[in-house]
Image (tube, rainbow, N blue to C red):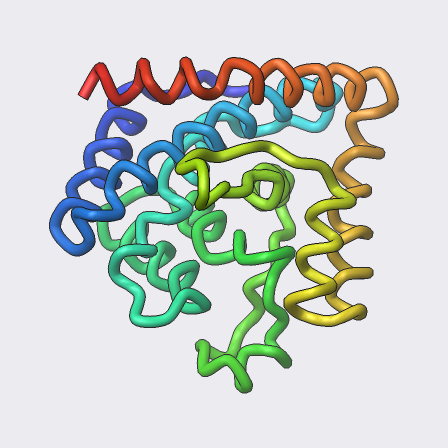
Amino acid sequence: MTNIKDENIKRAWGLLEKTAQAYKPEWKDGIMEHARIVHDVSLFLARLFPKEAHVELDVLALGAILHDVGRSRAERVVEHGVKSGEIIRKQGFPEAAARIGETHMGVGITKEETTALGLPYRDFVPETLEERIVCYADNLLFYIPGEGRHELRDTDTVVERFTRELGEAYGRRSREFMEKIEHEIGPQGFRQFQKYINEFNRELPNRLEKNRGEK
């Protein structure tokens, strides 16, 4: 695993905040909180993989921070992954980080699915481990509108959501995607991750209040 480059990380946080403030200031707090959680969950999960997996932590961190940088610039929700990739590239971040941004939607969008969605005709499916980790972490994070907060859920909840919204075939695809990650970290790693999720949810209100107070 490589060391995270602090300068790029700082620049990524600045870009995310600046972009949200410029285009959707009313979304800024939510976008920043979402990114902080996906970033933290992704890095924790990455460290549960065996060393031979060679997770690139610098790329992972950048992609986790910036995966939704295009959210405030996209005219349609389905376009925001593509927009994130464009912005990440334009700002000179690594191509691998841009790919994380454009492949994190659901469990990916195949080339065949892009036409109906009005997206560029190419695959937007997470393939590298870094892409898959951010996609997995992002899927676990649910926003609770009535309470104005986020919460980490589990694979069953993710599958239920995608089945309801996108159909049974996509639901099956999402289960295969999510469970593959869980298999790769192994039973012990998955138990550690479940414990992390439970602790994270208990501490989340305090974490978010602390983040807001630091602005």
Q: Which of 16 and 126 is in front in this view?
A: 16
> Left or right: where does residue 41 sit relative to residue 20?
right
Q: Which residue is drawn at 59% across and 57% down?
A: 106
Residue with the most extreme bottom position: 116
Residue at (20%, 48%) from the top-left corner? 26
- Toward which corner of the image does residue 141 lie, by quadrant? top right
Report the front residue among 80 and 86: 80
Residue at the location (84% across, 16% down)?
188
Q: Which residue lies furthest to the front in this view?
A: 146
Judge whether 32 appears above or below 170 on screen: above
* Residue at x-position 18% and y-position 21%: 215
Residue 146, given in percent of the width and then of the height, sits at 45, 43
Of the 4 image quadrants, the one containing the N terminus is top right
Residue 72 against residue 1 in the figure, above or below: below
Q: Which of 187 and 63 is in front in this view?
A: 187
Q: Where is residue 130 in the image (x, y as percent from the top left)?
A: 57, 38
187 horizontally vs 144: left or right: right
